[in-house]
Image: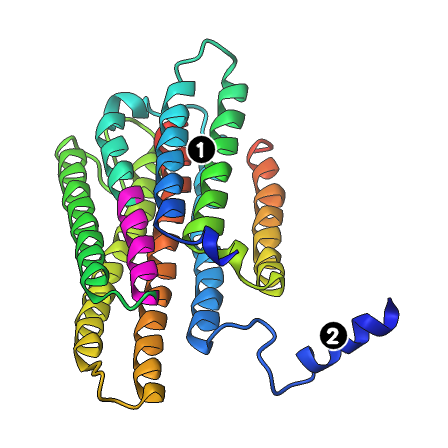
């Protein structure tokens, strides 16, 4: 048993191979997402702290429309599903489907942002500010703007990122030519698929963060 | 294992995520103590998170080593929450 383990472990971690068996871009994306999780984790931890410490919390179900936010959640989950489909299509070198699903994902993200802008407008019109609000507990609107704003900034960056990926993917798929040497064509397709996949990780992470924002800020 | 990855898995994950989201919104209307509702909502959020990470981000199809590396920050996050929150109740 011991001998088998050494035989497997040594070449793997001894250098010269990739122990995680992923491309560097994917590993860097996961590393970045882990660090970004700490940012959101710290925000949510301090939000829950402030809420636990507050003697009373404003009736947020009466102030924020849970059905509307439910629709936003639906959109983000759906755009995550279309993103996963785009990644799969890119791996299969299916240019038409990759493009279609990427466009759907971007449209989902843009609609989400539009709805968030509407929600913010409504909230601001009712008197909410990051430093004050009519319901007594300043932390309520302060954390609302901080956390949903930071998440919205991530969605905005994600839309820009996906637009760039879409443009490059379309370009790379157009470059594929049956006349090319097999090696070159495979490299082109693999690079294109890896680019879509790594962008997908980012997009799913934004959805992942929303799961906790939705649960802790809107539902509870 | 390769056969499991595909459009089918993603649509099934999508449907489950929507079902769990509906449950999340549903449980707040249950006539039970608020503590249980909070526990249920947090549990359902964790279910959704694991569906996203394992299926959409296909961590379950990667090498185990990657999942172990990523488990470390999650453990630190949990520790941060658990050390942080009890203090709020002492204020």
Q: Quadrant of the C terminus of chain A?
A: top left
Question: Relative to A214, does residue B63 appear above or below in the rendering?
Answer: below
Q: Which residues are magenta?
A: A77-91
Task: Residue A38 in the image: state x and y as whole percent.
Answer: 48, 56
Q: Are marks 2 and 1 on the same chain?
A: yes
Q: Is residue A57 visible from the viewing direction of this image?
A: no
Label 2 – label 1 distance at C-alpha: 50 Å
Q: Chain under label 2?
A: A
| Nearer-the-camera pick, A50 or A24 | A24
Residue bearing the label numbered 2: A8
Q: Are marks 2 and 1 in contact (CB under 8 Å)?
A: no
The spot of residue A59 in percent (x, y) is 32, 21
Q: Residue at x 53, y 62 (%)?
A: B62
Q: Nearer the viewer, residue A67 or B62?
A: B62
For the point 63% across and 44% down, the residue is B83
- Residue for point 34% across, 59% down: A88
Question: In the image, is residue A152 above or below residue A70?
Answer: below
- Residue projecting furthest to the front: A179
Image quadrant in which you'd find residue A181? bottom left
Residue A175 place in picture, x, y as percent:
19, 82
Q: Is residue B82 part of the magenta span, yes or no?
A: no
């Amino acid at each position: 048993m011991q001998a088998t383990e050494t035989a497997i472990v040594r070449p793997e971690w001894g250098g010269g191979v990739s122990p995680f068996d992923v491309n560097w871009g994917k590993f860097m994306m996961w590393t970045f997402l882990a660090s970004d999780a700490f940012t959101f984790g710290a925000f949510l931890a301090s939000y829950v702290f402030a809420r636990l410490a507050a003697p009373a919390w404003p009736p947020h179900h009466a102030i924020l429309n849970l059905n509307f936010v439910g629709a936003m959640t639906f959109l983000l989950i759906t755009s995550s599903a279309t993103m996963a489909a785009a990644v799969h299509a890119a791996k299969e070198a299916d240019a038409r489907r990759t493009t279609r699903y990427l466009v759907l994902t971007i449209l989902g993200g843009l609609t989400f942002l539009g709805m968030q802008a509407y929600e913010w407008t409504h909230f601001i019109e009712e008197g909410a500010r990051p430093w004050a609000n009519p319901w007594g507990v300043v932390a309520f609107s302060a954390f609302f703007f901080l956390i949903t704003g930071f998440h919205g900034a991530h969605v905005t960056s994600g839309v820009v990122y996906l637009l760039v990926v879409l443009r490059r993917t379309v370009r790379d798929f157009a470059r594929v030519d049956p006349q090319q040497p097999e090696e070159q064509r495979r490299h082109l397709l693999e690079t294109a698929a890896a680019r879509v996949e790594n962008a997908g990780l980012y997009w799913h992470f934004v959805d992942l963060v929303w799961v906790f924002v939705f649960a802790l800020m809107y539902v509870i | 294992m390769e056969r499991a990855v595909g459009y089918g898995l993603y649509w099934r994950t999508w449907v489950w995520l929507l079902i769990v989201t509906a449950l999340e919104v549903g449980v707040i209307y249950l006539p039970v103590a608020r503590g249980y509702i909070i526990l249920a909502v947090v549990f359902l959020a964790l279910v959704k998170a694991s569906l996203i990470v394992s299926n959409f981000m296909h961590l379950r199809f990667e090498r185990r080593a990657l999942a172990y590396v990523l488990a470390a920050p999650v453990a630190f996050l949990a520790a941060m929450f658990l050390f942080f929150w009890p203090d709020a109740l002492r204020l």
